[in-house]
Amino acid sequence: MPRRAWEILRQEGFRSLWFHILGETIYRRVLLFERPLSDPIPSASATIPVEISLLKPSEVEEYVAFHPGLDAGEVRDRLDCGGNCFLSRHQGSIVNACWTAEGSVWIDYLGRSLQLARDEAYVYNNYTAPRFRGLNIPAVRAVVMLRHFRELGYRRLVAVVVPENKAAFRPPDKAGYRPIGVIGYIGIGPWRHELMSAWRRRDHK
Ligand SMILES: CC(C)(COP(=O)(O)OP(=O)(O)OC[C@H]1O[C@@H](n2cnc3c(N)ncnc32)[C@H](O)[C@@H]1OP(=O)(O)O)[C@@H](O)C(=O)NCCC(=O)NCCS
């Protein structure tokens, strides 16, 4: 058994390994979450002091050095398309970042887009530097993000989480997101059947 598969089996169990295998072959799904901005926005604090700001074009190289697997061109494209990246800094260094996008947004894991209404934003690519995890930093950043979009008149934020990514559930949960459905696909090569369940068709296109 490959080393990665063995690690998943040992740490997360057979069910998780099974969905990892399906995810690599014929079946992928994500949980869809919403965070209505009419709900209260409680304050939050992290274990260490952090300052939240929006990524500026002059900071792209610094951000790329912080986040593995992203290149500067892709980051500039995201900014050019109107995306926002909320940075959390501790003692001046980036320790967490999370993106928002609007309009027709791309869900990389599913290889499909999702059309949002004008008063919705998609939250994605939440990432904390490994040695700063478990310090509640995303919760502080989430409060700033929620207030930002509420002040702009947005109705809600949406996000997706891959069910096997257990650590990824806590930040949206703590920020008041709630699951509203599952989207995914089953298919091989060009044949693909899109799946949606408990989908609020009146809210999404
Ligand atoms: C998912 C992720 C952003 C969470 O960031 P974080 O800064 O650790 O978030 P939190 O501080 O809210 O901790 C979340 C949970 O991680 C767990 N955790 C606690 N200490 C931890 C540590 N030292 N290391 C890792 N996880 C820890 C806890 O279950 C915690 O929940 P709790 O607050 O109820 O105890 C981070 O794990 C990460 O960057 N993962 C890789 C990228 C990813 O998968 N992103 C999500 C999909 S977009």
Image (cartoon, rainbow, N blue to C red):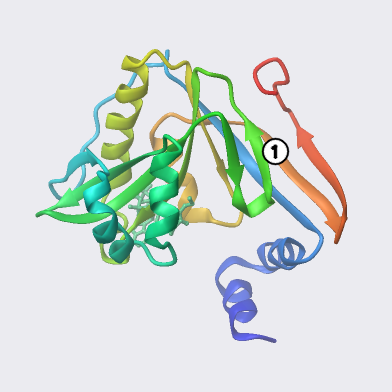
What residue is rendered at 72% in x and 27% in y?
Answer: 199
Which image quarter: residue 153?
top left
What residue is rendered at 21% in x and 40% in y?
Answer: 52
Q: Quadrant of the C terminus?
A: top right
Q: Nearer the viewer, residue 58 or 100?
A: 58
Q: Is residue 115 above or below residue 155?
A: below
Q: Could you say where residue 17 lies in the image, as x and y percent from the top left? A: 68, 68
Q: Is residue 36 left or right of residue 23?
A: left
Q: Is residue 82 above or below residue 169?
A: above
Which image quarter: residue 114?
top right
What residue is rendered at 87% in x and 56% in y?
Answer: 190
Q: Nearer the viewer, residue 199 or 116?
A: 116
- Ligand 1 placement by image quarter: bottom left
Q: Could you say where residue 61 lies in the image, as x and y percent from the top left? A: 27, 60
Q: Nearer the viewer, residue 179 or 81?
A: 81
What element does badge 1 sit on? strand
Q: Is residue 45 above or below residue 7?
A: above
Categorize mark 1 by other alpha carbons within 10 Å: few (<14), some (14-19), many (20+). Answer: some
- Amino acid carrying label 1: it is Val
Q: Is residue 22 left or right of residue 169?
A: right
In this view, the residue farthest toward the left is 91
User: Ligand 1: does it lie within 8 Å of the C-beta at label 1?
Assistant: no
Q: Is residue 27 left or right of residue 7?
A: right
Q: Is residue 186 above or below residue 130?
A: above
Q: Which residue is mark 1?
A: 182
